[in-house]
């Protein structure tokens, strides 16, 4: 039962309230309300973050900064207007519905740390740094997220924003497998970024959602692929390696066996789509 | 606690509790077009405009809208016209999901969206569980003047 509602304006005020009350932060509410109603969160205090004087979405150097409270809709508009990291749009537009995107926030998605979080997957692909206040800590998202719903955050801290790399000249593929077209929580998802030179891999980033307790990305495997010639054989190798690395579970959405085959097939599908091996009628 | 909010162009001072949800407050003050559906933001039935943008009123604390503008079906003059077309096209079997759909469709009219593919994408979050979407789309196409 919620008895207190706070609207802090400064970082210190917010931090003090969080430490003192153990309250939950409310920005978009799209996830918070589901948890409150399901009873997985029990709190008497809500801390509304919307009144916080924070920075806006902005480009600083070669980074895209997304602050607390910025919604998916706002991010999408910024990406279009500034022609930056356009690949992100393909992920953002699949999240929830237009109404949810007018409320939900990327920072909220990362703080929830679900292995199915679409923006979490995006943040892994773009080597996101999580900016934490009031301690001004900054750490890579892969270190920030410790497991499903578990994050490296002290009681007085909150996520102030995230910084994504700005990437140019990458081929991009994203697919989310679900049971319908809207409001899907993915059964499995794949995001792939690839930079090539003379048909050889210059840089590759591969991330899977919902096939392990965390977003699955293996940077050592990625490094081992640099310089390799791009062909079907190589992608078959990648598909098999990631299938080995994945550790999906069976849940209401799908079985672990199905998810394992998806890991393999999504990689092959990405190759076919990126390199136009798909026969178009 | 008290909040000041403009509902359908009328300034109001409302008495609310910290845990009040916008959906419940609107209903309590007589805006009965706003209905509770799934209560998780998934179905679109409780959609209202917050500062002109469609949002799920079931997932917003009423305290958040202090100083903001809310529009419901009651405050949209075009709503009647769309409701009439929905009825004519047999798109309203039970009518429970209509208010959310109407709010969102009138919003699309303001954006001057006329491509059916775009309309379908924008309305993806408005679920209907009894009538189905064929009749709805006929009505919406008429209302928006979708080019064929």
Image: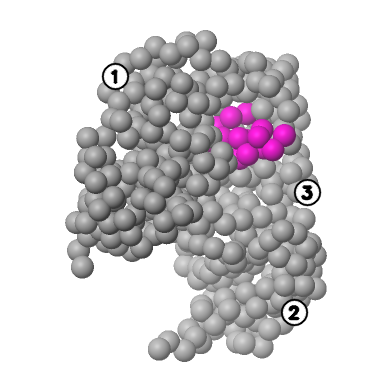
**Residue at disc 2, secondary structure:** helix
Task: Report which residue position mark 1 lands on.
Answer: B10
The residue shown at (69%, 49%) is A114
Nearer the camera: disc 2 or disc 1: 1
Residue B62 image point, x, y percent: 49, 23
Residue B13 is inside the magenta segment: no
Image coordinates of residue B46 in percent, x first then y, are 45, 38
Q: CA distance from mark 1 to mark 3?
A: 48 Å
Picture residue at 39% right of the left edge, 59% below the top: B133
| Magenta stretch bounds | A25-39
Quadrant of the rendered structure where residue B10 is? top left
Disc 2 to disc 1, how far (Cα)? Answer: 62 Å
Q: What residue sits right under mark 3 in the picture?
A: A147
How many numbered badges does the structure rendering display? 3
Label 1 or label 3, whichever lies nearer to me, is 1
Number of residues whose C-alpha sits closer than 10 Å to that of mark 1, classed few (under 14), some (14–19) or many (20 or more): few
Residue A240 is tagged as 2
Using a 10 Å C-alpha cutoff, classify the residue at mark 2 as few (fewer than 14 neighbours), some (14 to 19) or many (20 or more): some
**Which quadrant of the rendered structure holds the C terminus of chain A?**
bottom left
Closer-to-camera residue (A141/A210): A210
Proximity of marks 1 and 3: CB atoms separated by less than 8 Å: no
Along the line of sight, the residue nearer the viewer: B104 or A148 = B104
């Amino acid at each position: 039962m919620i008895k207190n509602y706070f609207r802090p304006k400064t970082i210190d005020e917010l931090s003090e309230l969080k430490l003192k009350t153990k309250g939950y932060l409310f920005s978009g509410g799209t996830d918070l309300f589901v948890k409150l109603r399901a009873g997985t969160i029990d709190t008497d205090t809500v801390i509304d973050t919307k009144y916080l004087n924070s920075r806006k979405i902005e480009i600083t150097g070669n980074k895209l900064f997304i602050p607390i409270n910025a919604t998916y809709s706002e991010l999408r508009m910024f990406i279009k207007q500034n022609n930056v990291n356009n690949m992100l749009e393909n992920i953002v537009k699949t999240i929830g519905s237009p109404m949810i995107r007018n409320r939900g926030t990327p920072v909220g998605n990362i703080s929830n740390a679900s292995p199915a979080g679409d923006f979490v997957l995006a943040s892994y692909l773009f080597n996101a740094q999580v900016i934490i206040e009031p301690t001004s800590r900054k750490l890579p998202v892969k270190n920030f997220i410790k497991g499903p719903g578990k994050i490296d955050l002290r009681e007085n801290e909150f996520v102030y924003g995230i910084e994504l790399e700005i990437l140019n000249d990458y081929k991009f593929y994203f697919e989310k497998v679900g049971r319908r077209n809207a409001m899907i929580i993915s059964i499995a998802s794949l995001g792939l970024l690839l930079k090539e030179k003379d048909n050889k891999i210059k840089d590759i980033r591969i991330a899977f959602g919902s096939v392990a307790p965390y977003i699955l990305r293996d940077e050592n495997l990625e490094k081992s692929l640099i310089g390799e010639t791009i062909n079907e054989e190589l992608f078959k190798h990648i598909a098999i390696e990631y299938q080995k690395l994945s550790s999906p579970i069976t849940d209401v959405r799908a079985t672990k066996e199905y998810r394992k085959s998806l890991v393999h097939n999504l990689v092959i599908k990405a190759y076919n789509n990126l390199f136009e091996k798909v026969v178009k009628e | 606690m008290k909040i000041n909010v403009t509902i359908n162009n009328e300034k109001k001072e409302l008495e609310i509790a910290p845990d009040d949800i916008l959906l419940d407050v609107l209903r309590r003050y007589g805006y009965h077009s706003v209905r509770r559906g799934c209560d998780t933001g998934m179905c679109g039935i409780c959609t209202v405009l917050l500062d002109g943008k469609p949002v799920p009123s079931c997932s917003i604390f009423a305290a958040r809208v202090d100083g903001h503008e809310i529009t419901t079906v009651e405050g949209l003059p075009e709503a009647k016209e769309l409701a009439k077309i929905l009825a004519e096209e047999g798109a309203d079997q039970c009518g429970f999901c209509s208010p959310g759909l109407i709010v969102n469709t009138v919003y699309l009219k303001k954006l001057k969206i006329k491509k059916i593919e775009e309309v379908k994408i924008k309305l993806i979050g408005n679920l209907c569980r009894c009538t189905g979407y064929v009749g709805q789309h006929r009505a919406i196409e008429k209302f928006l003047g979708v080019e064929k």
